[in-house]
Amino acid sequence: MRKIYSLIVMLSALPAVSLAAIDCQKLPGDRWKAGVEGQRQADLGNGCYLNPILSGDHPDPSIIKDGQDYYMTFSSFEDSPGLIIWHSRDLVNWQPVGPALAQPTDAVWAPDLVKYGDQYYIYFTTNRIIDEKGTKKKTLYVVTAKDIRGPWSAPKDMGLQNPASDPGHAVGEDGKRYLFMSGGNRVQLSDDGLSTVGPMSVVYTGWQYPEEWEVESFSQEGPKILHHGDYYYMVLAEGGTAGPPTGHMVIAARSRSINGPWENSPHNPIIRTQNKQEKWWSRGHATLIEGPDKQWYMVYHGYENGFMTLGRQAMLEPIVWGDDGWFTASGGDTGKPLPMPKGGEAVVHGMAWSNSFTADVFPLRWHFYHAQNNELQRVRLNNGELVLQAKGSSPKDTSPLTMIAGDRAYQVEVTAHFTPQAQAGLLLFYNQKLYVGLGVNAQGVVMHRYGMERNEKAPAHLQKVNTVDFRMINRENIVTFWTRAAGSEKWIKYSVQMEVSGYNQNVGYDFLSLRPALYSAGEGSVTFSDFRYQALPEAE
């Protein structure tokens, strides 16, 4: 059973030694220092940290070191604004900077954040459905900026026909620039990095794991290239992103030339979940980075055992370089605390969710799902209120506004005022096929469950009202809703509760997470106000 301990209680149970002598792995592995709401705090404050470094859905991390600063971005898939940039100075505490992608650009997969010369680049591919059969067309894009905080350019199609996914930028010994991609592919870039030169070609065939291993698929993907010492190192994932918890893994290869041949590491897999009892599943898609202490680390993602609904969370693990020039993971049990990187300084971790309907916070915290080009025109921010123009008829076609929650248990409250022909709703939203929640309109209440709608007569306390308070509690995948008429003090519990642990990639596809969401459907508009988010104690 879980108990919530304060840091003082945790340390009092340890022998009387200095903090520097604490064995982090002997500390409890399920204790969290209270952090900013909506973002579990990784820094335990005692020289140790506990993964994830960014909780909630932060998949396919791409990270750079820029002087004493670190910047990281992630796959944003259907989110718009997308490609949120995060900043750190110690690799553990992170703060959002801003989106690099303001306009909707299909589904954004596996970016690579790069600084080359005095310019920043983000390379990414998109997958766009082009017919009723679900056929997807991939496009390779780049966005650029002189300042990491923006403004960023509009996405530029790099002109590569039928690209692979997951670009990873590299500069060869010839001074030429390249992108390595999934499937062992590589393509040369123009000197300015804004277009491709010639077709892709396969330059690496991967590492073959034992046939008896339980994996999702071979899926050689996510190559990241590092020039270190005498070698180019390719760090990549195999085994599939989800599926069996033992599938996704980190492997490595190296070459003295950017042109190969590539020699597989004798230590492969560098990281792999060994069994489903471990805290972290499907760990992969790693990038190597030098820490502020000149030690080396890997940043990668993983699913939390029992909480795939939170999506792939960002993790940090130390590595060591051997005398043979190969690196290995040295973190031990990543379900337990690990030693903090030394030499850095902490930024304020995360950003509050409550009262986030302001111009400075809104684009960092709220994202339209499957946005159209004019989606932001539906939004008006007015003195801390969100006026959201209605669209569609249900969550399937409204492009809900979603937020990335990082807690296992939390409560959301919001007030919604709807015009006569509009419908206001609060959801837990995975994708347009899989969501739960409540909607209210002038005719009654709509229950959303399993991605379906059921219209109901309005209960007595919601009849002839146009302003409703919603409350939703997600307590470790058990979801409960309450409503009340604005001005009332009494919350009325909705009669149906929902279990949502299956709302994840292994059921719903799309590589997403289950997120609190707001929607405005029908005609007219909904004004949302007093949005409040609160992390809750976990069940004992």
Image (cartoon, helix red, strand yellow):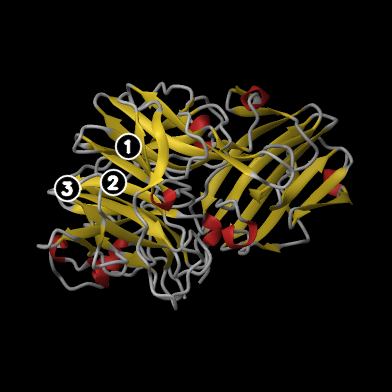
> How dense is the environment of label 1, judged by Cα within 10 Å: few (below 14), some, or many (20 and up)?
many
Residue at image mark 1: 178
> Of the residues shown, which amino acid type is indicated by label 3?
His
Identify whether 469 is placed above or below 67.
below
Q: Residue furthest left?
A: 323
Mark 2 and 1 residues: CB-CB less than 8 Å, in contact?
yes
> Of the residues shown, which amino acid type is indicated by label 2?
Ile
Q: Secondary structure at mark 2?
A: strand
Say left or right for 375 vs 310.
right
Q: Secondary structure at mark 1?
A: strand
Q: Identify the residue shown where x is 66% and y is 33%.
A: 528
Residue at image mark 3: 228
Q: Determine the CA span between mark 2 and mark 3.
A: 10 Å
Residue 446 at x, y percent in the picture: 81, 48
Looking at this view, is 107 or 315 the one in front?
107
Q: Earlier in the sequence, mark 1 or mark 3?
A: 1
Q: Quadrant of residue 339?
A: bottom left
Say left or right for 168 vs 309.
left
Q: Earlier in the sequence, mark 2 or mark 1?
A: 1
Mark 1 and 3 residues: CB-CB less than 8 Å, in contact?
no
Disc on res. 225: 2
Residue 465 at x, y percent in the picture: 83, 37
Q: Secondary structure at mark 3?
A: strand
Of marks 2 and 1, the one in the foreground:
1
Identify whether 285 is placed above or below 304.
above
> Of the residues shown, which amino acid type is indicated by label 1?
Tyr
Say left or right for 60 vs 63.
right
